[in-house]
Each structure stands twice: as structure tokens, then as C-alpha cells.
Image: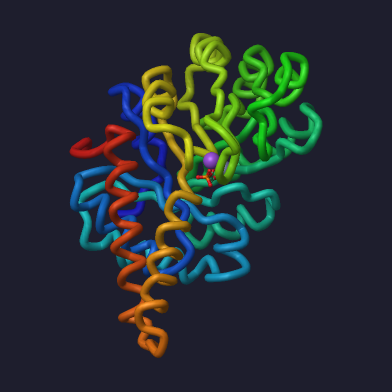
Amino acid sequence: MLLSSREMLLKAQRDGYAVPAFNIHNMETLQVVVETAESMGSPVIIAGTPSTVESYAGPVYIEAMAQAAAANCHVPIAIHMDHFEDPDVIKKNILIGFKSCMIDASKHVFKENIAIVKDIVEYAHRYDAVVEAELGVLGGQEDNLNVSEKDAMYTNPDDAVEFVTATGIDSLAVAIGTAHGLYKGEPKLDFDRLKEIRDIVDIPLVLHGASDVPDHLVQKAISMGICKVNVATDLKIPFANAVKAFFVENPDASDPRKYMTPGKVAMEAVVRHKITVCGSANRY
Ligand code: 13P
Ligand code: ZN
Ligand code: NA
């Protein structure tokens, strides 16, 4: 069954693990995520950005594919709008059946961010949907920032309390030094900041940009209160590399059932590994 991510994240928070949120783009990637999660007994969040859900696949396709995938599953599955900025688009997709969203209003000033997010929370909760929002900026390479730059960009713990209280959001994405995509060196996560936030914010916390973060750092973040771990790039690269390798071996191939399969196999290994890192196997 497709659920909201509310219960999943609260259970993860209680029991000290994280629910993985995997970014998908099409039927094949959605199948890999759901089938692997089911085989490992892991709750899972299927995430799509606006460029996937709106521009590439269409929200009706994504919702229908997720319903089809979930119909044969025992694990809880949620479809999640990741990094959506347009409130009207979020509302439209909630009516289609999405029960989980991230409203990314972090580029707006604090008060405006609060107003935009609060409006979405009020709407979403009427439809049993949940809302994640971000405070702070999750940029490209952030690991070489000095202290004042960090204070400007990373999540401020006191602001986080005010933000959570004023908006009524269900989970908070924290900016603590991760970035989308790959890192130049090893990323430096601000665990002191995470602890400060965890001590005074009681809702589930979300880690974006988890690709290319060493496993032990992801696990440390989970042990300190991260309940949802977002992974995109670490799935895309091996999928593409496996398809490229297949075409090198089989330059005349044209059957998608043949050339997509090695991509799915390569991606499955990564999904399996990330579920293990999150500690979410056999948790339902
Ligand atoms: P990565 O591409 O670093 O995995 O980031 C994923 C993410 O944060 C999706 O919201
Ligand atoms: Zn993200
Ligand atoms: Na990353």
C-alpha cells in the first residue's frame, strides 16, 4: 500500500534507523527500488524531483507505477515529491495521490519561507499527506566554508525550533555540510550542529545529498537523529555505467529489455547497500 511517510519516519526515529529515500526516474528505477526494499523487508520512500515528476514522466504515471509496485508488497512505501518549489504543483499532486512532499522554499527569506511552508502544511494535512521543509542552504561544495559562512548557510538550531513550531512541518531537512552530487574530498559534516538541532527539535530530521558520503558518516548521522537519507547520484552513475558497458560489448544492441537489465542489476546492488547502511532492513 502507498502510505504517507509519517508513520515510517516516526518509527525510524523511535527505533534509531533511517528510511532511505531513493530518487527514481522511470519504471525500471522504480521497480528496482521497490523490489529490493520488499526483498529486504525495508520501508522505502520513492522520491521524484519536479524535473522527473512534472517534466519527464508525469505525476499520473509515477503514481500509477508506484501503486502497481506497492500492490504486491508488504513493506510500507511512500511516493514523495522531492525539492518541489511551486505550491500549486504540490497541491495538484496531493490530489493525484502523493502523500509526501518536500517544499523547498529555502531560497526565500525566513518569514516568507515560513508563510509558504505553513500554507502547504495546512493543505497537506487535510489530505493525510506530510511535509518536509529545509532550513539552511544545501549547495554544491560546502566543505571548505569558514565559521561565519557556515553560520550563514547551515541550519541554525534556534531558527529551526521557530521554523518547526511556526510551520507545523512533519520533518526537517538540515544543512550540516552535505551537498547534492559528488564531493571533491571527504565531506565534513557538522555533527555538533546536528546534535544541537536534535536536542531542541523533536520531529524527524532528513539528510540530503547522501551520495558519496562515507558509510560511517551516514551511520553516525543516523545515530544522532537523522531518520531519512536521500540518495540520487549513487544510483544514477552505476546504472548509466552498466548500460554504457553493455553497449561497448554489444554495439548493435537495440532491445531495451536487454540493455536496461544490466543497469537495473548494478542499481540493485547499491540500493541493497544503502538499505543496509540505513539499518532499515526487516523493520516493518
Ligand atoms: P545525492 O545526489 O547526493 O544523493 O543527493 C540526493 C538528494 O538530496 C535528493 O533530494
Ligand atoms: Zn536533496
Ligand atoms: Na552527495
| x 68%, y 25%: residue | 144
Locate residue 259 relative to residue 133 in the image: left or right.
Answer: left
View quadrant of ligand 2: top right
Position of residue 183 measured from the top left corner of the image (x, y, whole percent): 57, 38
Colour setup of the view = rainbow
Q: Which quadrant holds the C terminus? A: top left
Residue 64 coordinates in the image, percent (x, y): 40, 68
Q: Considering only vertical position in the picture, is 61 above or below 283?
A: below
Residue 88 place in picture, x, y as percent = 68, 55
Tell me the quarter of the picture where residue 220 sits: top left
At x 49% / y 50%, what residue is drawn?
232
Residue at image coords 49%, 15%: 198
225 lies above or below 118: above
Residue sitting nearer the eye, 18 or 178? 178
Nearer-the-camera pick, 212 or 132? 212
Q: Measuring from the top left, give residue 154's x and y in whole percent.
A: 67, 23
Please tell me which residue is depicted at 45% across the width and 65% down the height of the picture.
240
Quadrant where the N terminus is found in the figure: bottom left
Number of numbered tags placed on the structure image: 0
